[in-house]
Amino acid sequence: AQSVAQPEDQVNVAEGNPLTVKCTYSVSGNPYLFWYVQYPNRGLQFLLKYITGDNLVKGSYGFEAEFNKSQTSFHLKKPSALVSDSALYFCAVRDLRNFNKFYFGSGTKLNVKP
Amino acid sequence: GAGVSQTPSNKVTEKGKYVELRCDPISGHTALYWYRQSLGQGPEFLIYFQGTGAADDSGLPNDRFFAVRPEGSVSTLKIQRTERGDSAVYLCASSPSSGSTDTQYFGPGTRLTVL
């Protein structure tokens, strides 16, 4: 079965510091991985995805994610956090046997303090 | 352009009542998905439409839940005999097709509260 895990419920960082939000995955075959962000009372917004190619994927708002096959991880990163980055972040994997389904992690709340 | 829209944004109902939740996908998107997001959890897949037909409804929790997309655009999620456990945010997403690399674009959700 396809699944993702986000081991941290919450991540706290100071503005200007680098941030990492962790995600590990379990899939059979090659993974299609996604990151979404959710602001209060808003829908999920797409940040970036890994399908194939370079392990470092660049996305919206200065975010990037590193695909690591040996560690089955797809951590979200940003070199310098902004207070406005504070939100809920979800990692997701697409079921390759069934392209219709996304499996989401439980989410990580990012708090960026000024 | 316009994104995915969902109405109502909030719905409060009483146990046992019937509710309908509406989703307007991005124009031209053929694939449409419904998810349910409970408090503190990630979205859980409910049903997927390709065009007018429900191609995969394996995520619907029971036969009280039903969804339609009669003209291949707007979709309605219908819940009969609502229960308190149905309280959640119901998210709709659309994508240009069902291709494996396609991104899903989400609406703001409908928060359903069953009293």
Image (spheres, rainbow, N blue to C red):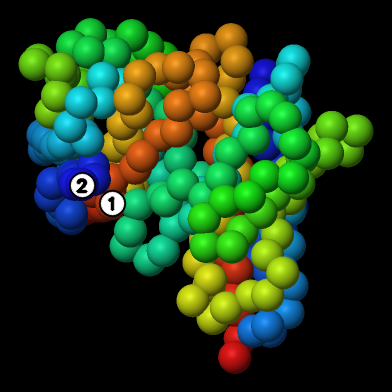
Q: Image point 35% across, 19% down: which residue?
A: B97
> Do pointers 2 and 1 mark residues of a single chain?
yes
Q: Image point 70% across, 59% down: which residue?
A: A77
Amino acid found under the numbered disc labelled 2? Gly
Q: Nearer the viewer, residue A92 or B104?
A: B104
Disc 1: CA contacts within 10 A as few (<14), some (14-19) or many (>=20): many
Residue B92 location in percent, x, y? 29, 37
Q: Which mark is residue B108?
A: 1
Residue A57 location in percent, x, y? 67, 45
Whether residue A11 is situated above or below residue B89 in the rendered picture? below
Report in which chain the residue with disc 1 lies: B
Note whether residue B72 is visible. Answer: yes
Q: Nearer the viewer, residue A96 or B40?
A: A96
Disc 2: CA contacts within 10 A as few (<14), some (14-19) or many (>=20): few
Whether residue A80 is situated above or below residue B100 in the rendered picture? below
Left or right, A94 with respect to A76, comes to left
Left or right, A26 with respect to B97, comes to right
SS at badge 1:
loop
Instruction: Decide which of tag 2 and tag 1 comes sooner along the chain.
Output: 2
Amino acid found under the numbered disc labelled 1? Pro
Residue B10 location in percent, x, y? 18, 55
Residue A33 location in percent, x, y? 63, 34
Q: Quote the CA–CA distance across marks 2 and 1.
A: 16 Å
Q: Image point 45% across, 26% down: which residue?
A: B102
For discs 2 and 1, the disc positioned in front in the rendered view? 2
Q: Nearer the viewer, residue B103 or A9?
A: B103
Q: Residue furthest front?
A: A54
SS at badge 2:
loop
For label 2, the residue is B1
User: Dividing the picture into quarters, in which one does residue B105 lie?
Assistant: top left
